[in-house]
Structures are given as structure tokens and as C-alpha cells.
Amino acid sequence: MVKKSVARELNQKNLAYFSKVLEDVEHFAFFGTMLGLERDGDVIEGDDDIDFYVPMRERSRLITLLLKHGVSIDCEEWPNNTPYFLQARREIAGNEVLADFYLFEDIGNGLLADRWNFYGQVAHPDMVLHVPSKLVYPLQKREFFGHQVSLPHETRALCEFLYGRTWKQRLQKGTAYRTTIWRNKPLVVVGKFSYVRYKILKALKKIRRRLVSAFTA
């Protein structure tokens, strides 16, 4: 999935459009879209898409509704052909805009499981993102640029959960900070040596995975 930056006003219109279309489907803004709305009161300038969480049980209804409204979804294309993720495409004034839908499931014990999350490594149990449901429900509606947008209940706490204590700072992903998943939680490494620490964590995760496989074989 190759993406490119999108003008802020296009992502604003895209967020408003899907928020209206999905009124009867459980959904809420998440990841970078939620971060921008909470931190900046707007979508992030130059972001490449808008992000939603939708329960996995709503997948078929979501697809039917989007296709009914003329939104393009290739359900034969990877990863749209998995249960965990959908990418929708539409045009605004000749510009292609994207909406990513992360399909989660309630696994009990107060946790929502997102297998796609940051990395799409759905085959690895330790890469499943566990989101505390108490931070999500009950959902809330807030107005942005004249439109109602569905958001989790505790957006500030979720921003810190996903992006660390520096979530209020405008840091460049992949250079100023990197995110990995450790024991099903996001682990954000920030600063000058973030790449080195990130590589060490990745190596530790591989070792841990091999040890778990050896003891459970």
C-alpha cells in the first residue's frame, strides 16, 4: 500500500464524509486521526489517510454500506481480503483520498484486540495490540469543522497509550520516534538513539518469540 501526503482540507472533508456515512455502524476515529483531533483540534497536516476502528462483527455491513455509497474497496486485494483491515478509496475534486479501517474484536478481560495495528503482523500473537476497553467506551461525539465525529471516551489517555508521554509534541515518525509492540502494548522510543533502541527491542522480541516457540513445541 503506497501512500502519499494529502492536503489537510481533503482529509477534513474525507473525515466528515465517512463520519456521516457510518452513522449507523459502530466506529470511531483512532491512531493518527484521533491524535490530530485531540492534540491540534484538526487532522494532521500532510497525513496520508484517516483512520477508524470498527468492530470485526460489523465488517460485512461496513463493506455493504461503503459500496452502496460508491466508495471503492477491492475485497480481493491484500490486506482487504483479511478479516483485520480494510482500505477504502474515493475521490474529492479529482484527488484520491483514503480511509483505513482497523477491525478489532472484544476478547474479554477489558481488552480490545487489533491484529493489524501498526505492523500488520497478524500471525504473531505478541504483535496483537490490546487496547483497554475502558478507555474506549462509552464513545463520544465531538464537533470538528462543523461535523460530528465519533471518538473514544478517553482520547487523551489513548494518545499517551499509543504515542507515549511525548504525544503532544509534533515528532516525525520513523526519525524522531519509533513504535514497536511489546507484550501487546505500544512501546515508543524517542530521541537521538531511538533507532538503536528500536533495533535492540526488535532483536529481543525475536529471541523471546523463539524461546516461547521452543517451550511450547
Image (tube, grey):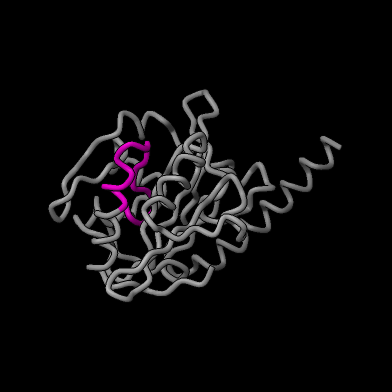
- Residue 188 lies, in percent from the top left, at 46, 54
Residue at 35 percent across and 46 percent down: it is 160
Please name whichever residue, 197 or 44, is drawn nearer the observer in this view of the structure.
44
Q: Residue at x 28, y 42 (%)?
A: 150
Q: Which residues are magenta?
A: 18-34
Q: Position of residue 116 (x, y in %)?
A: 55, 50
* Residue 26 counted in the magenta span: yes
The residue sitting at 56% across, 67% down in the picture is 196
Residue 88, position in %: x, y?
44, 58
Quadrant holding the N terminus: bottom right
Q: Nearer the viewer, residue 107 or 203?
A: 107
Q: Residue at x 52, y 42 (%)?
A: 114
Considering depth in this image, is 158 or 147 the residue closer to the camera? 147
Q: Is residue 107 above or below residue 9?
A: above
Q: Residue furthest right?
A: 217
So how many labels did they put on this image?
0
